[in-house]
Image (cartoon, helix red, strand yellow):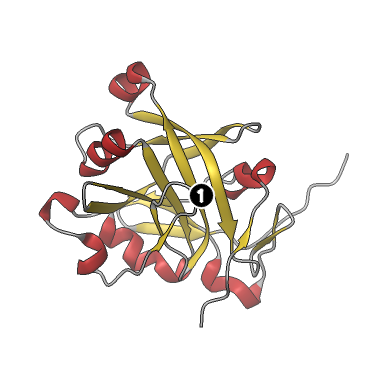
Amino acid sequence: MTTPFLPVALEHASRLINHGPTVLVTSAHGGRRNIMAAAWSMPVEFTPPRIAIVIDKHTFSRELIAASGSIGVCIPGAALADLTFAVGSCSGREGDKFARFGINAVSGPVLGVPLLEAGCAAWMECRLIPERHTEDAYDTCFAEVVAAAANPAVFTDGKWNLHADNAALHTLHHLGAGNFVCAGTVIQARPL
C-alpha cells in the first residue's frame, strides 16, 4: 500500500532536488509518453520555484517536452535503483517505457504530466521556460514548478526526514556506469 502524497508548499519545492538526486523525467504529448533518468538537475530560483535539468537535445524526451511545454520530475527512492537505471538505458522511441517496465503513473494536477508516486520520494510538475540558446548549446532546460508533492515518510514541512525506517525512499545519486549511492546519513551543521 502506498502512502498518499501530501502537497509541498511551492516555496519548499526547490528543497526536493537541492541535494542533487538522480531524477526521473516524464513527458507526454500527442498520445505518446516517456520516462528517462537524469543525473544533472538543480533548483535555480525560489520564488517562483524554477529548476534546471540537462536533457540531451536528441532524446525522445526533449521532443515531447518541446511539443507539450511541460515536464514531470520524479525523485526515485533507493528501491527504484534498477528501474531508474533501466529507463535511463533505453530510448522511448522504441516503445512505451511505462508499459515495458510496468510503471503506473498518476496524472499531474495542473498540466496532466505523468508522475510516479510508488517508490518515489516526491514529484514536481513543471512548465517549460523556453530558452533556446541554453537548450541548444548546453542541453539545459529551465522550468517553473507549478505543483509538487512528497511522501510524508521522507519529506514534510519543507524538510527531509531520512532514517532507517524509510531507507527504501532515500534518494539516489548516480556515480556513473549504473552505480548509485543513497542519501541517508544526515549530518546537521552547527555554527562554529
In the rendered view, would you say 157 is above or below 125? below
In the rendered view, would you say 104 is above or below 175? below
Give the x, y percent position of residue 75.
48, 56
Give the x, y percent position of residue 185.
65, 61
Q: Residue drawn at (22%, 61%), measured in percent from left and top?
A: 97
Lateral position of residue 136 relative to residue 144, left or right: left
Lateral position of residue 169 relative to residue 131, left or right: right
| Residue 155 visible in the snapshot | yes
| Residue 91 visible in the snapshot | no
Q: Which amino acid does label 1 sit on?
A: Met
Q: Of 166 and 12, which appears nearest the observer?
A: 12
Quarter location, residue 67: top left
Quarter location, residue 84: bottom left
Q: Residue drawn at (85%, 46%), measured in percent from left and top?
A: 190
Quadrant placement of the C terminus: top right
Q: Which residue lies furthest to the bottom in this view?
A: 1
Lateral position of residue 112 relative to residue 148, left or right: left
Give the x, y percent position of residue 128.
41, 33
SS class of the residue under badge 1?
strand
In the rendered view, would you say 93 is above or below 86? above
Q: Which residue lies furthest to the right in this view?
A: 192
Give the x, y percent position of residue 64.
25, 41
Query: Mark 1 = which residue?
Result: 124
Q: Residue drawn at (51%, 83%), measured in percent from left and top?
A: 1
Lateral position of residue 53 relative to residue 28, left or right: right
Q: Residue drawn at (56%, 51%), measured in percent from left and top?
A: 148
Number of marks: 1
